[in-house]
Image (spheres, rainbow, N blue to C red):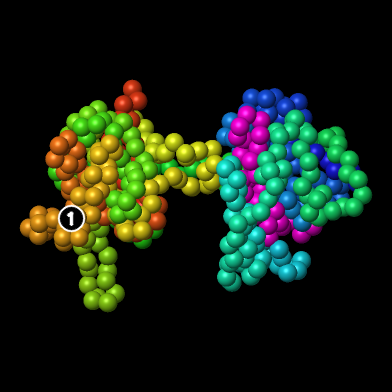
């Protein structure tokens, strides 16, 4: 069987057509430069492609979609370029459709997901009835050959579609003699396929800027009010730790700051809504984020704080590295004295927490307990978040790269600046 191979700068997932077709030579140049491009495999007379591959070496990513005869995507593979020229088969997803009339990604379609890690771990999730049924999670048993593959030469990728959908006869790949027209090259597709983008901080500075109008799907009209100072934190070692103080370990995340004592701030946001139960309008003010202020210099950029074992090249769309909590609690603390400060925190919690008057001084405050190690003066300030699970930490840096602040959202990003 003959399979035709064509190239383009992008791919329109909605229409299954290429965007800005390329010659093979132009695609080869983009491959060498690390710029993104797609390779499309088709058989003559078939409406749907066999498979499409998105290659973006600068983003350490290669994506693959396999299509069936009905034009539905049945297999997705996410490869990550690690260890020089080796590709980790990071994630594989497969959909099983009950019949040719079942729409793509039907909620009842069977799904299987395999997620692999460089250290040899793997997770297999099976959903025989899609999202309408239960799931079964087990360890993924794969060989090293299935986990890793060598980076192929340009144009030398193996055809996964030939393995999962046939055909039985040998396959011969040839470049398309005529570049197939696709979407309007001057109009970028709304559903253009891109490499996965990790989660971003959002407009953190706006949360601390009084008068900023914010909007969200739940509350279309919100206003940032003046941030509130909630004491200071002493970090004499110059190493700030951020983690949950309840688990007896940590801190997982650390960042170097100049030794010193720094203000703690809470961002506040006000909004109103109609309460359907009391049939009245309710005005609210809540804390949206906590911040350790290292400098009054505005942040020129924000970056996700990661631990030494975290590899940003492995993150999927919207994914972030976090500290985790099972008690909806986080803390800023001197990392060198974390163990001693955490023990003091445990004692304070067992004895009922801070002084009652102090705790009620600001009913909106998310800061719960503060502890101080007497010999060094190092401190810990624990704060509440609104949910268990993972919470990312964002570090603001000046134009010179100096740390100017560290922020944790206590309830996710409450919204975006209103237009």
Q: Position of residue 51 (x, y in %)?
A: 75, 47
Per the image, is 77 magenta? yes
Q: Position of residue 401 (x, y in %)?
A: 35, 25
State whether residue 3 appears in this view: yes
Q: In the figure, residue 82 lies in which quadrant?
A: top right
The kind of secondary structure element at disc 1 is helix
Residue occupying image coordinates x 90% and y 52%: 168
Of 110 and 337, nearer the camera is 337
Residue occupying image coordinates x 44% and y 36%: 308
Left-right relation of 398 to 103: left
Of 181 and 112, nearer the camera is 112
With respect to residue 412, does 340 lie above or below?
Answer: above
Magenta residues span 69-95
Q: In the figure, residue 94 lies in which quadrant?
A: bottom right
Q: Position of residue 283 (x, y in %)?
A: 21, 62
Q: Position of residue 323 (x, y in %)?
A: 38, 48
Residue designated by label 1: 348
With respect to residue 156, does 121 lie above or below?
Answer: below
With respect to residue 89, does 95 lie above or below?
Answer: below
Helix, strand or loop for the magenta stretch, by majority: strand
Q: In the figure, residue 97 lies in which quadrant?
A: bottom right
């Amino acid at each position: 069987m003959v399979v035709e191979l064509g190239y383009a700068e992008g791919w329109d997932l909605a229409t299954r057509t290429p965007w800005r077709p390329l010659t093979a030579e132009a695609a080869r140049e983009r491959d060498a430069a690390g710029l993104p491009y797609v390779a499309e495999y088709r058989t003559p007379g078939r409406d749907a492609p066999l498979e499409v591959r998105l290659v973006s070496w600068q983003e350490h990513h290669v994506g693959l979609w396999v299509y069936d005869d009905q034009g539905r995507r049945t297999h997705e593979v996410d490869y990550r370029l690690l260890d020089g020229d080796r590709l980790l088969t990071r994630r594989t997803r497969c959909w099983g459709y009950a019949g040719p009339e079942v729409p793509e990604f039907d909620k009842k379609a069977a799904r299987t997901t395999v997620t692999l890690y460089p250290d040899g771990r793997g997770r297999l999730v099976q959903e025989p009835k899609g999202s309408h049924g239960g799931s079964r999670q087990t360890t993924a048993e794969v060989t090293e050959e299935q986990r890793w593959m060598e980076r192929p030469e340009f144009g030398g990728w193996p055809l996964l579609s030939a393995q999962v959908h046939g055909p039985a006869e040998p396959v011969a790949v040839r470049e398309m003699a005529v570049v197939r027209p696709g979407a309007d090259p001057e109009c970028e597709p709304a559903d253009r396929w891109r490499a996965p983008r990790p989660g971003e901080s959002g407009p953190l500075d706006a949360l601390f800027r009084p008068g900023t109008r914010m909007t969200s799907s739940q509350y279309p009209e919100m206003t940032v009010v003046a941030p509130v100072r909630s004491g200071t934190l002493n970090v004499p070692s110059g190493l700030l730790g951020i983690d949950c103080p309840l688990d007896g370990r940590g801190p997982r995340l650390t960042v170097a700051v100049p030794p010193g004592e720094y203000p703690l701030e809470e961002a506040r946001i006000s909004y109103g809504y109609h309460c359907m139960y009391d049939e009245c309008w309710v005005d609210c003010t809540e804390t949206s984020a906590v911040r350790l202020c290292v400098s009054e210099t505005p942040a020129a950029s924000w970056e996700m704080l990661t631990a030494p074992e975290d590899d940003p090249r492995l993150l999927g769309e919207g994914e972030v590295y976090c500290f985790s909590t099972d008690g909806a609690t986080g803390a800023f603390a001197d990392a060198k004295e974390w163990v001693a400060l955490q023990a003091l925190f445990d004692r304070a919690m067992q004895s009922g927490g801070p002084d009652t008057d102090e705790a009620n001084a600001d009913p909106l405050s998310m800061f719960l307990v503060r502890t101080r190690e007497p010999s060094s003066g190092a401190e810990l300030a624990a704060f509440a978040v609104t949910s268990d699970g993972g919470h990312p930490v964002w570090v603001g840096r000046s134009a010179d790269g100096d740390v100017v602040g560290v922020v944790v959202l206590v309830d996710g990003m409450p919204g975006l600046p209103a237009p």
